[in-house]
Image: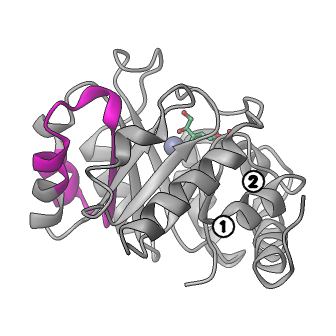
Amino acid sequence: MSVLIAPSLLSADFSALGEAISAVERGGADLIHVDVMDGHFVPNITIGPPVVRSIKRVTKVPLDVHLMITDPDRYIEAFAEAGAAMMSVHVEVLPHLHRTVHAIQDLGVKAGVVINPSTPVVLLESIAPDVDYVLVMSVNPGFGGQSFIPRSESKVRDVRALLDRVSNPAPVEIDGGIDIRNVGRVVSAGARMIVAGSAIFHTSDPERATRELKSAALAAVSSPAVR
Ligand code: DX5
Ligand code: ZN
């Protein structure tokens, strides 16, 4: 893996998700990022397993399902059955994170753990050897189109260092406020899965926006650190 681009459907036109998915797949999307919100953990409400099942039918690349819900344990099986290839859960809501991560993996789904901007990296220390990826939120979750929180760049670096320390090659994903201007910096910091919503779907040409974001991300992998 070099860098994977994961367009977030949250900023797409929900009446035409199939077309949105085809466009970004033509542009080179490696994953489709699906944001699930319950109106409790975050103020917004989005979609559940039936919609994920429909999306799965028209998607060629793996579905990366980001659960922003207070009780993910109740729903992981339903999202796995609906077609999630990857599922991430927030450390902030899970007192038994180890059990949840393994429950996701037992369903044949890659398990990711997410930290909010105010959540310290140290909370990942004991779970780091078990995860398939770590998602660093670079905005407070709930809405698309927010500004990137600059401190997230060093957080990506710290998470990468933690995973390296426990010899886990799991990639770091970043989500929130990513665009063509800052993608190079987060890739240089160690991010290898890039979520982008508004930078792709709030443009006149999501296919081209995906392609451009991907080439900017790939350029940063092969060039020395951009600071
Ligand atoms: C925010 C979601 C993100 C969102 C990102 O809570 O988790 O995936 O869609 O949107 P942008 O890229 O517009 O910040
Ligand atoms: Zn997300």
Where residue 187 is drawn, which disc sits there? none
- Distance from mark 2 CB to nearest ligand 1 atom below 8 Å: yes
Helix, strand or loop for disc 1? helix
Where's ligand 1: which quadrant? top right
Give the residue drawn at x 77%, y 31%: 147
The relative height of residue 15 versus residue 46 in the rendered view (above or below) is below
Quarter of the image where the N terminus is located: bottom right
Helix, strand or loop for disc 2? helix
The residue type indicated by label 1 comes to Val
Between disc 1 and disc 2, whose residue precedes?
1
Residue 187, position in %: x, y? 72, 65
The relative height of residue 22 versus residue 152 in the rendered view (above or below) is below
Residue 203, position in %: x, y? 84, 49
Determine whether label 1 and label 2 are within 8 Å by CB. yes
Residue 76 vs residue 216: left or right? left
Where residue 24 is drawn, which disc sits there? 1
Q: Which residues are magenta?
A: 76-101
